[in-house]
Amino acid sequence: MTMAVLISIILIALFFEFINGFHDVANVVATPIASRSLSPYQAIILAAVFNFVGAFIGTAVATTISKGLVDANVITHLVLIAGLFAAITWNLLTWYFGIPSSSSHALIGSLVGAAVAASNFGTVHYGVLVWKIIIPMILSPIMAFFVALILVVIVFRVLSKRKTPRKSNAQIRELQVISSSLLALSHGSNDAQKTMSIITLALFSFGMVSTVTYIPTWVIALCALTMALGTLTGGMRIIKTLTTRVAKIGPANGFAAEMSSGLLILGASHLGLPVSTTQAASGSIMGAGYPESGGVNWRVVRTMATAWLLTLPCCMLMSFIIYKLLFILFGDLGLAINV
């Protein structure tokens, strides 16, 4: 029974990782597709490869989630399962409606909600929640907007001095291969770690790892491969939103958006901040498209921002309810995970 619970948690976590891959692929491929620097097929293949590679860059984000978010003594197997179910449900709902929401905040909110359901509100480490989750959630799209705006203005000025615009655009399109690869690498470095933390918590509960701060290499590789496979499936509903509805994107705009969001996400991964790659990428697209005439569709932006604000509370409520229902049906599925 206990081994079946462990296998179930790992499989559900990998299913979340797969959905995360196709849900968030738009963050990486939207700009090169919109600027016609890469075909959708080329962009998705490139994103899958560098998502896989990026997953092997550090484990600071995984440590933040597994050890710093809630009291570890209330994290039971049922809490993990309820949190994963809620996060998966939210991702599928937002994917269906083509809304670029945050898979990261969906998982974090779901884990917090399930932990509260298992205990009480006192189990949440509010300092970590505020300083490492909520404040970066607010600041990351704003910072991405202005960094991309500054960068695109610089690129435009450099290009304006060129006498051969067509050749300049061709060169920028070539540079976009590098910048979109950087963005994919940063996405893998941040998002893949969230699922690693869930699997590691489950492994620790069975005594298979000595500490939650140690992520086994096979867990990293498995999460990396699963995210890459999810990326290959496309997620075209959200890709359409970011490529055609948020802002007007040309090669220069796309390069600026990718560089700004890629660098910001890599920095967050280094600091152990589980930021939303969706929000950083979307903010960069807005900033890069802003100088264009009518460049940003603010109606679509408002819809996206509403989804961003609702993700944490909605997932907390959803996982709270799911936990209570599962507890009635199955009990706690085992002892607490004492970290």
Image: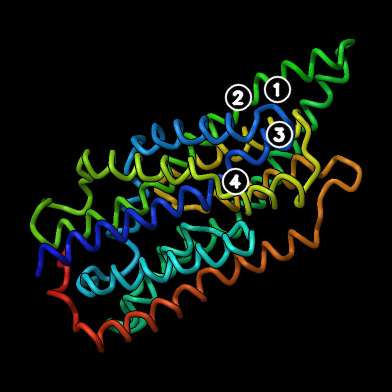
Q: Nearer the viewer, mark 4 or mark 3?
A: 4
Q: Earlier in the sequence, mark 4 or mark 3?
A: 4
Per the model, the C-alpha gap separating discs 2 and 4 is 15 Å
The residue at which mark 1 appears reads as 173
Identify which amino acid the numbered label 4 is placed on.
Answer: Ala
**Is residue 259 placed above or below 173 in the rendered structure?**
below
- Disc 2 secondary structure class: helix
Which percent across, then down, holds residue 110? Answer: 41, 70
Identify which amino acid the numbered label 1 is placed on.
Answer: Arg
Of residues 216 and 86, which is closer to you in this image?
86
Q: The N terminus appears in which quarter of the rendering? A: bottom left
Per the model, the C-alpha gap separating discs 1 and 3 is 9 Å
Q: Earlier in the sequence, mark 1 or mark 3?
A: 1
Q: Tell me whether circle 4 and circle 3 mark residues in contact (CB < 8 Å).
A: no
Residue 26: image tag: 4
The residue at which mark 2 appears reads as 177
The answer to whether residue 222 is seen in the rendering is: yes
- Disc 3 secondary structure class: helix
Q: Earlier in the sequence, mark 2 or mark 3?
A: 2
Q: The C terminus appears in which quarter of the rendering? A: bottom left
Mark 4 residue crowding within 10 angstroms, few (<14) / some (14–19) / many (20+): many
Which percent across, then down, holds residue 221? Answer: 28, 38
Residue located 55% across and 36% down the image: 44
In the displayed orientation, state which residue is furthest to the top.
Answer: 163
Q: Tell me whether circle 1 and circle 2 mark residues in contact (CB < 8 Å).
A: yes
